[in-house]
Amino acid sequence: MESKNYLQDITEIKNLMHKSSRFISLSGLSGILAGIYALIGAAAAYYIVTNSSRGYLILDGTIYKICMAILVGVAALSIATGIFLTTKKAKKNGEKIWDNSSKRLLINFLIPLVTGGIYILIILNQERYGHTAALMLIFYGLALISASKYSLGDIRYLGLTEIILGLICAFYPSYGFWFWVIGFGFMHIFYGTLMHFKYDRKKE
């Protein structure tokens, strides 16, 4: 009986250490909504580009600026939704939204993401559009893997999936739009659904 108590105490200590070192209040629903936003944004961009007088998937001038504005809008809406739902979940679970674990998560996520963003802006300024989608997927995947050490381990698998899609996309740059749709749209919905039922619904 006494040995069982020791094992239970050790298990509780390990759980506390795990919670203190990882930010586990990420909302699966925010991932689902981010994927939906991406699909809506992609549909809007596709409609604008294919119905322009400049031809099929021409990303320059006004059309390019409109598509970039849609992309920025999707990213901003996804971030705002993620912050809102994650904060709500953290409060519900009695956890802090801003502590050492969330700081480490944010820093490790932003380093590869910002690096990739700057590099993409450089090649876009050089009017080399061909591998933009592949680079977005790869650097986003690297950011997720880097952040997964300080959050839910499932994020790592999403990151690996994004990197694989990005590498395949690099071989077929003409299909970059569709790889972007799969990576940022459908994969977010798929993994967000898994996380929602694995973590969110379990605590309801």
Image (cartoon, rainbow, N blue to C red):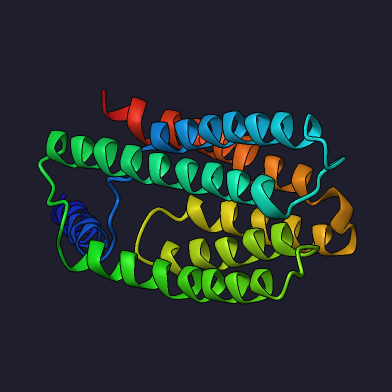
Q: How many labels does the image show?
A: 0
In the foreground, 177 or 146: 177
Residue occupying the point 81% across, 57% down: 169
The x, y position of residue 58, in whole percent, is 80, 48
Image quadrant occupied by the C terminus: top left
Identified at 58% across, 54% down, the residue is 157
Q: In this view, does 163 lie to the left or right of 201?
A: right
- Residue 85 spot, x, y in % from top left: 28, 35
Compared with residue 32, is residue 16 higher up or lower down, i.e. above or below?
below
Residue shown at 59%/67% (left/top)?
139
Q: Which of 68 and 92 is in front in this view?
A: 68
Report the side of 12 relative to 38 (left or right).
left
For this view, does 138 lie left or right of residue 36? Answer: right
The residue located at (45%, 37%) in the rendering is 195
User: In terms of image quadrants, where is residue 191?
Assistant: top right
188, above or below 18, in the image: above
- Going by the image, does 65 lie left or right of 194? right
The image quadrant of residue 41 is top right
